Amino acid sequence: RTPPIVRTDETGLAASDADKADPKAYAAYEGRQNVRVYAQFNDAANQMLPQLRADIERGKQLGIAPEKIARAEEKYRRIAGEQAAILKKYPELANAVSR
Protein backbone atom coordinates (compact mmCIF):
# COMPACT_ATOMS: atom_id res chain seq x y z
CA ARG A 1 0.00 0.00 0.00
CA THR A 2 1.36 3.40 -0.92
CA PRO A 3 0.77 6.65 0.92
CA PRO A 4 -1.73 9.06 -0.61
CA ILE A 5 -0.44 11.68 -2.99
CA VAL A 6 -0.48 15.07 -1.36
CA ARG A 7 -1.28 17.84 -3.80
CA THR A 8 0.09 21.27 -3.10
CA ASP A 9 -1.13 24.58 -4.36
CA GLU A 10 1.15 25.26 -7.27
CA THR A 11 -0.40 28.60 -8.17
CA GLY A 12 2.30 31.00 -9.20
CA LEU A 13 4.90 28.33 -9.88
CA ALA A 14 4.65 28.46 -13.67
CA ALA A 15 6.23 31.31 -15.57
CA SER A 16 3.74 33.95 -16.57
CA ASP A 17 3.38 35.05 -20.18
CA ALA A 18 5.13 38.29 -19.22
CA ASP A 19 8.04 36.32 -17.73
CA LYS A 20 8.29 34.24 -20.89
CA ALA A 21 8.30 37.32 -23.11
CA ASP A 22 11.07 39.19 -21.27
CA PRO A 23 14.50 37.51 -20.93
CA LYS A 24 15.32 39.47 -17.75
CA ALA A 25 11.98 38.62 -16.17
CA TYR A 26 12.43 34.96 -17.12
CA ALA A 27 15.92 34.93 -15.59
CA ALA A 28 14.41 36.33 -12.38
CA TYR A 29 11.71 33.62 -12.50
CA GLU A 30 14.38 30.93 -12.89
CA GLY A 31 16.28 32.42 -9.96
CA ARG A 32 13.18 32.25 -7.76
CA GLN A 33 12.64 28.63 -8.78
CA ASN A 34 16.25 27.76 -7.95
CA VAL A 35 16.00 29.38 -4.52
CA ARG A 36 12.80 27.39 -3.94
CA VAL A 37 14.66 24.14 -4.70
CA TYR A 38 17.53 25.15 -2.40
CA ALA A 39 15.03 25.96 0.38
CA GLN A 40 13.44 22.53 -0.01
CA PHE A 41 16.87 20.87 0.14
CA ASN A 42 17.66 22.86 3.29
CA ASP A 43 14.38 21.75 4.90
CA ALA A 44 15.02 18.11 3.99
CA ALA A 45 18.58 18.31 5.32
CA ASN A 46 17.32 19.82 8.59
CA GLN A 47 15.07 16.80 9.00
CA MET A 48 17.49 14.16 7.74
CA LEU A 49 20.79 15.11 9.38
CA PRO A 50 19.73 14.57 13.02
CA GLN A 51 18.20 11.21 12.11
CA LEU A 52 21.29 10.20 10.15
CA ARG A 53 23.55 11.18 13.08
CA ALA A 54 21.37 9.11 15.43
CA ASP A 55 21.54 6.16 13.02
CA ILE A 56 25.33 6.43 12.90
CA GLU A 57 25.58 6.45 16.69
CA ARG A 58 23.16 3.54 16.99
CA GLY A 59 25.13 1.62 14.35
CA LYS A 60 28.35 2.15 16.30
CA GLN A 61 26.69 0.87 19.48
CA LEU A 62 25.35 -2.18 17.66
CA GLY A 63 28.71 -3.01 16.14
CA ILE A 64 27.82 -2.39 12.52
CA ALA A 65 30.74 -2.90 10.12
CA PRO A 66 33.12 0.10 10.11
CA GLU A 67 32.86 0.49 6.32
CA LYS A 68 29.08 0.88 6.58
CA ILE A 69 29.52 3.43 9.35
CA ALA A 70 32.09 5.26 7.20
CA ARG A 71 29.63 5.36 4.27
CA ALA A 72 26.92 6.83 6.47
CA GLU A 73 29.35 9.39 7.90
CA GLU A 74 30.39 10.39 4.37
CA LYS A 75 26.75 10.77 3.41
CA TYR A 76 26.25 12.98 6.48
CA ARG A 77 29.30 15.09 5.60
CA ARG A 78 28.21 15.54 1.99
CA ILE A 79 24.66 16.57 2.88
CA ALA A 80 25.89 18.91 5.62
CA GLY A 81 28.50 20.37 3.26
CA GLU A 82 25.96 21.02 0.53
CA GLN A 83 23.61 22.57 3.05
CA ALA A 84 26.40 24.83 4.34
CA ALA A 85 27.22 25.93 0.78
CA ILE A 86 23.58 26.75 0.09
CA LEU A 87 23.25 28.70 3.35
CA LYS A 88 26.44 30.60 2.62
CA LYS A 89 25.05 31.69 -0.74
CA TYR A 90 21.47 32.20 0.53
CA PRO A 91 21.66 33.03 4.26
CA GLU A 92 18.00 34.03 4.26
CA LEU A 93 17.13 30.33 4.00
CA ALA A 94 18.61 29.58 7.42
CA ASN A 95 15.36 30.27 9.23
CA ALA A 96 12.91 29.85 6.36
CA VAL A 97 10.53 26.94 6.06
CA SER A 98 9.55 26.10 2.50
CA ARG A 99 6.55 24.21 1.25
Image (cartoon, rainbow, N blue to C red):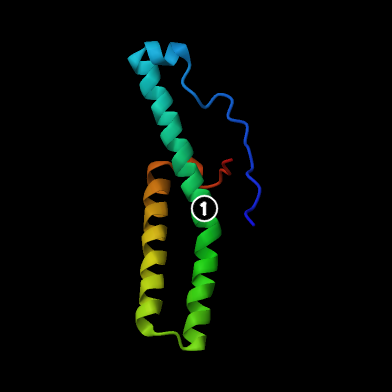
Q: Amino acid at mark 1?
A: Ala
Q: Is 88 or 39 nearer to us in this picture?
A: 39
- Horizontal and vertical percent for residue 34? 41, 35
- Horizontal and vertical percent for residue 88? 39, 47
Residue 2 is left or right of residue 76, and the answer is right
- The residue positioned 58% from the left and 30% from the top of the image is 10
- Horizontal and vertical percent for residue 8? 62, 36
Task: Identify the secondary structure beneath mark 1.
Answer: helix
> Is 72 rendered above or below residue 19?
below
- Horizontal and vertical percent for residue 16? 48, 16
- The residue positioned 45% from the left and 40% from the top of the image is 37
Task: Tell me the quadrant of the picture where the N terminus can be found.
Answer: bottom right
Is residue 31 visible in the rendered image? The answer is yes
Residue 85 is left or right of residue 92, and the answer is left
Task: Tell me the quadrant of the picture where the C terminus can be found.
Answer: top right
Outermost residue on the front side: it is 1
The residue that disc 1 covers is 44
